[in-house]
Amino acid sequence: MMDSLLVKNVLLDGARTDILIENHRFRSLNAPEGTVADEAIDADGMAILPPFYNTHTHAAMSLLRGYADDMPLQKWLRDYIWPYEDKLTAADIREGSRLAVREMVKTGTVFFSDMYFDIEETIRIVQETGMRAAIGVTFVEAHSKSQLAEKLDMLSHWSDPSGGLITLTVAPHAIYTVGPDLLVRCSETACRLGLKLHIHLSETQKEVEDCLREQGTTPVRYLDRLGVLGPEVVAAHVVHVDDEEAEILAARGVTVAHCPCSNMKLASGVFPYERLRKAGCRITLGTDGDSSNNNLDMREEMKFAALLAKVSSGDPAAMPAEEAFAIATRNGAEAFGFDAGVIAVGKLADALLVRLDDERMLPCHHLLSNWVYAAGSSCIDTVICNGRILMKNRIL
Amino acid sequence: MMDSLLVKNVLLDGARTDILIENHRFRSLNAPEGTVADEAIDADGMAILPPFYNTHTHAAMSLLRGYADDMPLQKWLRDYIWPYEDKLTAADIREGSRLAVREMVKTGTVFFSDMYFDIEETIRIVQETGMRAAIGVTFVEAHSKSQLAEKLDMLSHWSDPSGGLITLTVAPHAIYTVGPDLLVRCSETACRLGLKLHIHLSETQKEVEDCLREQGTTPVRYLDRLGVLGPEVVAAHVVHVDDEEAEILAARGVTVAHCPCSNMKLASGVFPYERLRKAGCRITLGTDGDSSNNNLDMREEMKFAALLAKVSSGDPAAMPAEEAFAIATRNGAEAFGFDAGVIAVGKLADALLVRLDDERMLPCHHLLSNWVYAAGSSCIDTVICNGRILMKNRIL
């Protein structure tokens, strides 16, 4: 097992330096000449950047990439996605997770927050890869009593086989698939076990209308009334919220996982970025599953987030490159409690080495602008997670 | 000089075949065993697809990539772009064009319609590369009489050094930089010489408001009143048009070059795709310059076009993958009069070979869906233009 890694001749904040990683953390950002390590990488012509933290996905849905597109949401779900999912075996989930994890690492992602089923298969694949993950134990109202008991038991007795890289989340699917009692039980379980609660929230106008009809209020207010909203909650999508709901989310410390491509492709609506940002919400980025995106490329997702924020607000200064970069990197790490997401001494060593000689990165007036607006994931040469190399020279 | 090329074991419409290219054209899509050619490519594991035709860009602005972002349009232009451009030398234009052309070929583009200055430099670079281009001779009101005469002379005496790959266009910059007399003169020149007329049109709300104030009507109606609109016109952006203007553009046979990333990034507005499509306009795709995109990646641009059409119309079925693909490929070829843009016997041999074993292309339920929504330009292995290989195994 490699304990130390020296990244030589790398560009950090515009200056060339050697970076020493020891015991999973950045030990020095300016290692003196003569520093030795178990392994060394010559990063000449490359910049070091924090990697991506994908805060909402369904990894094994890679199997459904391109299976059904360009149709209304209900038809998409009922005639294509759900019937396909009914036929998926554990072996399928394993293969789908493997494909997704390969895609994620090759596009610079070191962590994903997942919500799907047969999660043992996904956990095994993540463990083999050496990346981080928060795997959702999904709850829907349709589960039987014994299924529920099994899930709660799994959450209570979870022991991370990877020694700190993999955690579980309590993942009630959504307010329209989970009733109030089970939502509250999920919330209590998450709080008791110190786990995150991962849920789809206010994704479509239909969800809001149904909630108004059935609960007499909007989804965010409904969850708040149930006492479910708190700093452990990571709510995906959050497209349809008003000013007061944005303030409620901020006041409760909820993290909002923005999924621009999915919201655009399914025509769910336009994410109210400025509203949530001004309210003080922590905003992170997610790709959603391959079936509604249709990739897991967080670099592309950053560009979609920034350009959507600009055109929808009419303000080209909305979500500048630095903010798009923050929601895709350190905000996601923070939301899941990782001491990572920035290149700094003492932080967990998650990083990308990005080739600066690619045409898309030239000239380099502004590295983050090039990274957000111009780059392609193929500019990523090396992916480091927890001090360990997951990809080098684009080879996994 | 290679006269024939055999592309072996390639996937075309789901079936494996050998494709013979002779004298710049597809000769056979099902070449018999034993066919010989001057050169052969083994395309095992790859699909053949038409390449991209980028119908609006400013190639040499690659030099300004990331130079200024995330600010209001007028500040961007006046404080950054224009002062920078004032300092550009012919050598700069050459380097910028070289960088752009490399970026374009590596991302699968074989043609671009350009509008900039010092065009001799750009023409030389295009000629070296072997790609197609329509290079705009730009007109602005500020030009002196002798500059105008020189430009008109260049248009009249143009002789393509590449033997059919490079043409000129008459490119009055926009209605707010070119007065009515010069617009009419440009139009007459284009018609007389059988050239395209390339112009920015209805890009921003400000352009519409200024035109209403100064001309008493909207930009499209103003140009129509001048008699400038015809099938030779390629109008870039066309963001702000009403139903009647869409019908005028369709009736005159104008081609509309849609630039979604630029319109989103500069917050110019949302392209009225459904309105223009329903009116019967020919719609093509363009990246605009690297300074407002910030890349020339037409694959990414297709995804932006499709997802923007969906979210802005509220209809996930708007601009399905096939339409996004058409505007990026054959519509562009058609607009500029190339007998190309589809893989068919007798057509000019422009093509991409795309790797199907990349994670982003797997599984392959629907090739065009994967190509538009999931792929990255790094999936492109080989670029063929006019029967000649511009890139192979990702090497130019």
Image (cartoon, coloured by chain):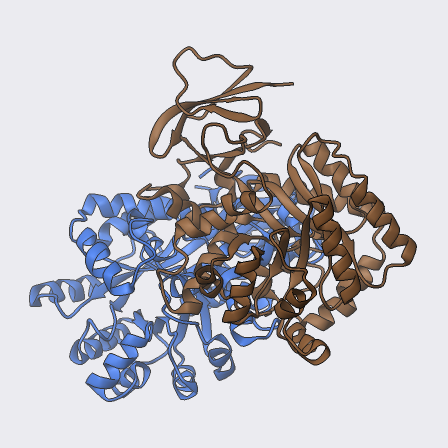
Chain colours: A blue, B brown
Residue A145: image quadrant is: bottom left
Whole-percent x and y of residue B240? 57, 70
Q: Is residue A267 above or below residue B169?
A: below
* Residue drawn at point x = 41 percent, y = 53 percent: A296
Q: Is residue A358 above or below residue B222?
A: above
Q: Nearer the viewer, residue A132 or A210?
A: A210
Whole-percent x and y of residue B170? 73, 51
Q: Residue furthest right?
A: B146
* Residue drawn at point x = 71 percent, y = 52 percent: B115
* Residue drawn at point x = 42 percent, y = 39 percent: B358
Q: Is residue A349 visible?
A: no
Whole-percent x and y of residue B219? 65, 70
Whole-percent x and y of residue B368? 39, 44
Q: Nearer the viewer, residue A37 or A111?
A: A111
Quarter of the figure with the C terminus of chain B: top right
Q: Nearer the viewer, residue A264 or A41?
A: A264
Q: Nearer the viewer, residue A325 or A345?
A: A325
Q: Is residue A247 visible?
A: yes
Q: Is residue A176 left or right of residue A6?
A: left
Quarter of the figure with the N terminus of chain B: top right
Q: Is residue A225 left or right of residue B65?
A: left
Residue B336: image quadrant is: top right
Q: Give the total of numbered labels.
A: 0
